Amino acid sequence: MQKIEVPYQLLSEISCIDDKEKQVLLNIYYAEIVHALCVAEKLSVPTRWVRAGTEKTGWSENSELVEAFRKSKFWLAMWN
């Protein structure tokens, strides 16, 4: 998101840009935001489930890890 150029010239009341160019700039801005969000989604949302029986032992002994695992399963289900 840091690399997206904000079309500040469209925010001013007095603009020497015609409507067609404004529409192009807004479309580019929108597409860059959507692209950044799609990349962020792919990098942050797990895409595979852990197969049953392959979990590491000891998870159930630590209550913090159990809670984190429960929350991660919940949010993965929300995204799928």
Image: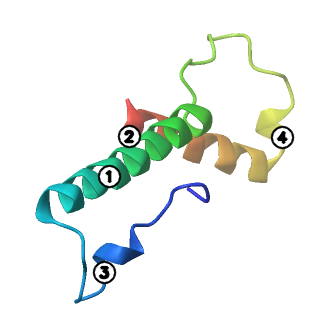
Q: Callout 3, which amino acid?
A: Leu
Q: Secondary structure at mark 2?
A: helix
| Residue identifier under label 3 | 11
Q: Callout 1, which amino acid?
A: Tyr
Image location (x, y in percent) of residue 47: 53, 22
C-alpha separation, residue under disc 1 versus residue under disc 4: 47 Å
C-alpha separation, residue under disc 3 versus residue under disc 2: 36 Å
Depth check, mark 1 against mark 3: the one in front is 3
| Residue identifier under label 1 | 30
Is residue 4 rendered to the left or right of residue 51?
left
**Which tag, 3 or 2, sits closer to the chain's start?**
3
Residue 74 visible within the image: no
Q: Secondary structure at mark 3?
A: loop
| Residue identifier under label 2 | 78
Image location (x, y in percent) of residue 13: 22, 89
C-alpha separation, residue under disc 2 versus residue under disc 4: 26 Å
Q: Secondary structure at mark 1?
A: helix
* Residue at (76% x, 53% y) in the render: 64
**Which tag, 1 or 3, sits closer to the chain's start?**
3
**Which tag, 2 or 1, sits closer to the chain's start?**
1
Residue 80 to residue 35: above or below: above
**Which tag, 4 or 3, sits closer to the chain's start?**
3
Image location (x, y in percent) of residue 11: 30, 80
Contact? badges 2 and 4 (CB < 8 Å) = no
